[in-house]
Image: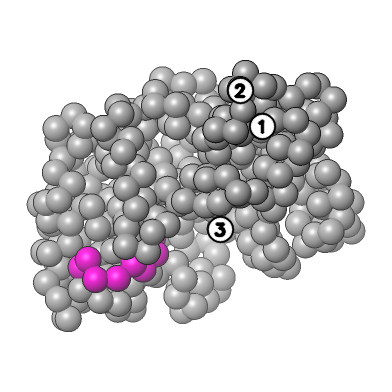
Amino acid sequence: MLEETLDNNPAWPGIQLTLSSPHCGLDCTTSVQSKAGRFADEPALFEDTPWRLASITKTFTAVAILKLVERGQLDLYAPAVQYLPSWAIDLLEQSQGVFNAGQITIWQLLHHTSGLGDFATDLRWMQEVFNEPQHHWTQRSVMKWSTVNSKPVGAPGEVFHYTDTGYTLLGLILEKVTGTGLAAAVRDLAGLDELDMPYTWWEILEPEPKGSTQRAGQYQDTIDVTHFHASFDLYGAGGLVGNSKDLNHWGRALYEGRLLDEATMQLLYDLESSGTYGCGVVKYTYAGQDAWGHTGHWGSWLYWVPSLDLVITGTTNQAAGGHFDADKVVRSIIDHGCTPKDASSPGLNSNEQGRNSVL
């Protein structure tokens, strides 16, 4: 199936995919690489090749924030300014104009209902990044650019507006509350140290793991962005590097309730007014089944399908040229003999032949 999918999407340099489901008898990783001439010089895409997770990082950031709430170190409904460094508060207060930045709560930052603009989707920001791909952005310079250029879209709590600015602020909050750097805070609070994730790290902020293969090439249409300085997407809204195996392992730990307690997990799933975004996770429907997860800009995904006990992770390493069809994957798994738990015996598993047919 992956070879056919890649043939039908010539802009993709390759696909890396991991599927795990004890219910369906699935635990497999595979990768395929484009044979197109434009990708002839790409490094090999192995099953453990790492890549930039991009906005999937938001789920890790949200889990870390919720863990602080669980530990009694953070109030979700308190003004975010209570936990921000003074320079960030100054930037917010200087830029807002239409409303008091002190009204923005941590809950609103998690749910993208803060009213803040989004620097990452601003064409002027993207132009600056592409014009100076090796520019080293700091948290302060990112926030200054955002507050000067990306104006508010509404008062806090009024409207859903997806914003990397908000998650950059959450990264600052993690640092302020824990007294450590962002990478160390997320590694501790989001369970990275507890789990076997040898090839997951925070780019620039942590050393590359020993034994890691070369990071995969990633593209914005025809532009190779692999070696753009990571700081343009680093501070909580993005920044993690990993592979589909590690990500699948972490996703399963999260959704099985091994990283957060039951009450906190309910907060994770609590949707904002648009009905699709929780705390760093998005609600989807694939092949008629509810799913949760997040995607990343460079064609990456983390999905959890509860009725199939299924975690789907992977990447195409391409921001343009179409999206990976998770609906097709879920439908194929069902068609090959794995019945959703709410429709039959939970012990019904697919066989080895079915597993191979899915991939």
Q: Amino acid at mark 2?
A: Ser
The residue lying at 43 percent from left, 31 percent from top is 254
- Marks 2 and 3 sit apart, C-alpha to C-alpha, by 38 Å
At which x and y percent is residue 328?
Answer: 72, 49
Image-quadrant location for residue 102: bottom left
Image-quadrant location for residue 220: bottom right
Residue at which label 3 appears: 297
The residue lying at 45 percent from left, 51 percent from top is 282
Q: Quadrant of the C terminus?
A: top right
Mark in the foreground, 1 or 3 = 1
SS assignment at label 1? loop
* Rendered image coloring scheme: one colour
Span of residues in magenta: 156-164
- Marks 1 and 2 sit apart, C-alpha to C-alpha, by 8 Å
Q: Is residue 74 visible?
A: yes
Q: Residues within 10 Å of mark 1 (few under 14, many from 20)?
A: many
- Marks 1 and 3 sit apart, C-alpha to C-alpha, by 32 Å
> Tag 2 or tag 1, which sits nearer the N-term?
1
Residue at which label 2 appears: 345
Mark in the foreground, 2 or 3 = 2
At which x and y percent is residue 209?
Answer: 55, 29
Q: Residues within 10 Å of mark 2 (few under 14, many from 20)?
A: few
Q: Look at the image and say whether residue 171 sits in the magenta stretch.
A: no
Q: Amino acid at mark 1?
A: Thr
Q: Residues within 10 Å of mark 3 (few under 14, many from 20)?
A: some
Residue at which label 1 appears: 339
> Tag 3 or tag 1, which sits nearer the N-term?
3
Badges 1 and 2: C-beta atoms under 8 Å apart? Answer: yes
At which x and y percent is residue 110?
Answer: 30, 53
- The residue nearer to you, when weighing 306 against 201, is 306
The residue lying at 17 percent from left, 62 percent from top is 104
User: In screen coordinates, is 19 left or right of 355?
Assistant: left
